Image (tube, grey):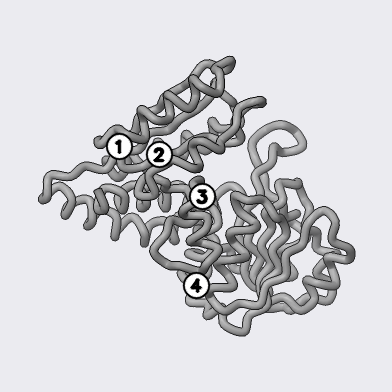
Amino acid sequence: MAIVVKGADVAGSIKEDIRVRITELEKNGKKPKLMMISVGDDPANASYERGILKVFGELGIETEKTVLDAGISQEGFDEAFTGVNEDSSITGILVFRPLPKPLSIEFAAKTIDPRKDIDCMGYYNQAALSMGRKDCYYPCTAEAVIRFLKYEKIDLAYKNVVVIGRSIVVGRPLVSMLISENATVTCCHTKTRDISDRISNADIVVTAAGSRALLKGEMLKNASPNLFCIDVGINMREDGKGICGDIDFETVEPLCEKITTVPGGVGSVTSTLLAEHVVRGAEQM
């Protein structure tokens, strides 16, 4: 039976540090504040937003949300974004993506203050990440995976890691981050043949494809018994009641050493890292 690594344990260790830093900010008359920007009120963002509000409420970090009309023009969106970006009281900006068509995120990505770009939306932080720099913001979900591995005291040097998924939000940045930690990385996606063969040499598998039950036990028949499977996927359950990940937990869990779950895994750490980034933004302002 695999060890289930819980997000609450990882998040708890991060929150302790956040509270100390908030106290120091208060001594210097500084206050962290998050601004969330949403175009329309997409239900798909509701679960993530609830997690953010819960964590930020626990930590006493101020949050605000700007909801723009679903039919807003590109000019209107860019103008609203500029107002938030230039507000000195805001130390972190989160834009819920993707924007509804035909809106483009390009203006916001070009102009966002790098100190407020807490989820690596902007081109500056994206470039810094790809260069392997440590002083930039990382996408929170991708960074959550790294924090799980560090919490488990896993030295990534010489480790073989398979990442299933190539999105610009999780898969691609995670590959860059793992390489910076000296891991050997294979990135699989919808056009990859024989994923099972690639998993056979893996020490760690991360699923980030957004496909329910993508990773099944039968795919691990030649995998190492010391395998650590980390589930980043968010999908609706087949019965429509609640969420699940990309891993078919019942068949995969008996065949690996460690595993995370959805819910209860990476998601809770993602929201906590968002809070950490907002605090970091206040420290830099």
* CA distance separating discs 3 and 1: 20 Å
Give the x, y percent position of residue 82.
Answer: 39, 30
Identify the residue under disc 2.
93
Mark 1: which secondary structure?
A: loop
Q: Nearer the viewer, mark 3 or mark 1?
A: 3
Identify the residue under disc 3.
123
Decide which of 274, 227 is in the foreground and name it. Answer: 274
Quarter of the image where the N terminus is located = bottom right
Q: Please give left or right for residue 260 compared with residue 199 in the image.
A: left
Amino acid type, label 4: Glu
Give the x, y percent position of residue 258.
Answer: 62, 69
**Mark 4 vs 3, N-terminal side:** 3
Identify the residue under disc 4.
152
Identify the residue under disc 1.
90
**Mark 2 vs 3, N-terminal side:** 2
Tell me, yes or no, whether the two marked residues, 4 and 1, touch with CB atoms within 8 Å. Answer: no
Residue 260 position (above or below residue 69): below
Circle 3: is it few (<14), some (14-19), or many (20+) Cα within 10 Å? some
Residue 248 position (above or below residue 229): above
Amino acid type, label 2: Ile
The residue sitting at 69% across, 58% down in the picture is 207
Q: Nearer the viewer, mark 4 or mark 3?
A: 3
Tell me, yes or no, whether the two marked residues, 1 and 2, touch with CB atoms within 8 Å. Answer: yes
**Mark 4 vs 1, N-terminal side:** 1
**Mark 3 vs 1, N-terminal side:** 1
